[in-house]
Amino acid sequence: MKQKRRAVVLVAHGSRLEAANEEVRQVAARLEERLETPVVAAFLELAAPDIPTGIDLALAKSPREILVLPYFLTQGRHVQEDIGAPLAAKARAYPETSIRLLDYLGKDGALVELLAERLGKVT
Amino acid sequence: MKQKRRAVVLVAHGSRLEAANEEVRQVAARLEERLETPVVAAFLELAAPDIPTGIDLALAKSPREILVLPYFLTQGRHVQEDIGAPLAAKARAYPETSIRLLDYLGKDGALVELLAERLGKVT
């Protein structure tokens, strides 16, 4: 992905338990290393940075495109509205950068295969 | 896994949005088909069946072992206490069946690879 000057924002719900937020940040850091592309963790509530700040942090990397990946297992108001609205505002403010909301993680059919492999390894 | 007479309980948080609960049930159904092992979806709150009922549904399959997999991306009170307590009660009531709580989904390092592949496919 590096050649496309992309950045990724991994959006999670956010938790009162700071260790849970730290887990999301660590997933973002491992993903950044794996993709060689900037990956920022951002949170809907209860943790920092929030989504607008997360987009600003991604914009600071001067990407041509920002991919926003909701780190959620199921759909709901959160993914549809609470993430979409701040993204639309940022897209209006920065028309030269494409800001794309991807499907949330739970929609990925490969998750079932990951679960099956884990269960198959339990001895 | 079939030869070990196992059953799986996939425990999710539960949502006010029934479509979100239905997504979890569909993951359980696809997993059951993939593993050829009974897989029951159960919910901490807001949806049915609850965890004790989910364990009962799994016990009805006469397994020697029940694997409980928390369908959560991050740790927290939910995984540690709210799932552990009803499991411990069921384990006391049914000592002839092994009931094992596995790590929650988010702890699986393979998730990063899944996310990386998804992002790599975005054109």
Image: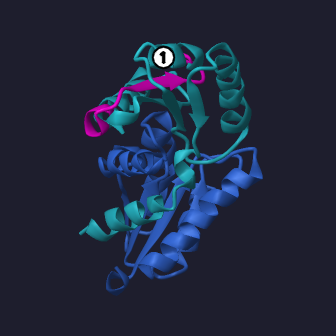
Chain colours: A cyan, B blue
Instruction: Look at 70% across and 24% down and name the residue there.
Output: A88
x, y (%) of residue B117? 38, 51
In reply to whether residue A84 is colored magenta, the answer given is: no
Is A28 in front, or is B25?
A: A28
Label 1 sits on a secondary structure element that is: helix
Residue B49 appearing in the image: no
Q: Amino acid at mark 1?
A: Leu
x, y (%) of residue B22? 69, 59
- In the figure, B98 relative to A104: above or below? below
Q: Which residues are magenta?
A: A32-50
Instruction: Look at 70% across and 42% down and name the residue there.
Output: A76
Instruction: Look at 68% across and 51% down and name the residue there.
Output: B20
Residue B75 appearing in the image: yes
Image quarter of residue B101? bottom left
- In the figure, B47 relative to A93: above or below? below
x, y (%) of residue B76? 45, 34
Is A50 in front, or is A87?
A: A87
